Amino acid sequence: MPPILRLEYACTEAETAEARSLNLRKQFGGSKWRTNFALCALLVAMLVGAWFRFREIPEGYRALILAAIVGGSVLFVFWKRRIRKTVPQTIKLEISETDFTILGADSRVVLPWSAFSECLESPDLFVLSDRSKRMLIVVPKRAFPSEDWQTWFRQQGTNATRPTTPFCSELPVPPASTSADRVALTVQPGFRDYLACTVASWRTWGICLVPGVLLLGISLYSAANPPPNVVNSAAKVFLLFVVPFFLVCVTMIVMIFSVHSWRLHVKYAGPEEVALCEESIAFSSANASGVFPWTRFEHYKETRWHFILWRGSRWMMLPKRAFTSWDDLNRCRELLDHRLRHSRWFLG
């Protein structure tokens, strides 16, 4: 009988931070000093370039730019801390040679080893990264019953993340539900879905607000202190230059975020079977399958094209075009109203 490793643990904040650091070092070449050197060099280059450009800006504009940078940085740090401020939860794992199962009180998520692209290791923990780079699974070495199990786990992770390992392409069937009002749909994300989610996110418009405030402040300062012998009025400059430039900035920000998110997931984001019922949400794809309770999410937002479910940084989108009938669409809306709280403040 194939061996099954069962682990139960709760990650500390230090272990979570170490896992993020390990993943960041992997992206910058592997070593800690190389990562720190690359980040410091990038910061110095940005500061030097900003200094030379900053000296060319009139003194009145500098205060506006500094205020916008400081205010934006404070809001960003506050938002990140609020998202990450969670109580450590106990994680239960069942690991075999073929599957990696995450167990919860009312949930069960099964991932084939082929769903992982990297198995990183430090002296204190293992970090598994999925192929779409959306999820990091942290497994502290203190949770293993012995070093032999650590060696076995290391071998499974190394074998699964080799380039020759075939990726699972079979689409399993979602777990069955006894609910008579079960709603089933097949989700196939496309670029328009990621574009719609980017537009629906208040984070996107918060970032777009930064150039808007800067341009508005510069325009007001120019109107209050017009140069001598001005050719074009401040109103004309605002309508013919500032407004079009702001629209171009907004379009670029939206497109950059949408293309980045789409390109990050398009290679592995195949069709996913989703089933909604009163008790839980079941899903199944080539990357994973399982069932989890509605408490996985806290809020939902309805747009013209999607339902978006989220809790913190974890979110899920359900395109309305995926529903086979209006009855299923209305049933989904009823389930969301009953199980989650309606909100407009999606920050995905």
Image (tube, rainbow, N blue to C red):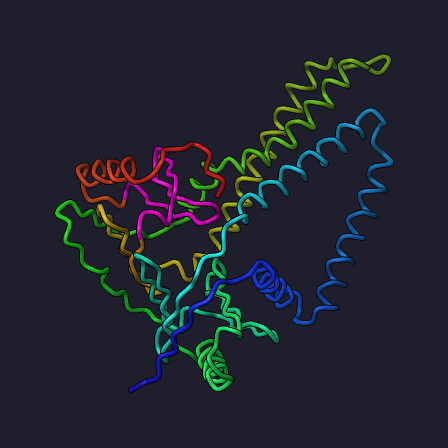
Rendered residue at 85%/27% (across/down): 59
**248 versus 52 height, above or below:** above
Q: Name above or below for residue 179 compared with residue 129.
A: above
Assign the N terminus to one quadrant of the image. Answer: bottom left
- In the image, residue 290 sits, relative to residue 83, either above or below, namely below
Is residue 230 left or right of 25 when viewed as pictured?
A: right
Q: Is residue 319 left or right of residue 240?
A: left
As for residue 318 lying within the magenta part, the answer is yes
Residue at 83 percent across and 37 percent down: it is 54
Q: Which residues are magenta?
A: 293-321
Q: Nearer the viewer, residue 202 or 4?
A: 4
Nearest the camera: 5 or 168? 5
Measured from the top left, where is residue 201 in percent x and y?
48, 38
Q: Is residue 234 magenta?
A: no
| Number of marks present in the image shown | 0
Q: Which residue is painted at 48% across and 86% down in the image?
A: 148
Q: Whole-percent x and y of residue 84?
A: 54, 49
**Measured from the top left, where is residue 286 in percent x and y?**
33, 65
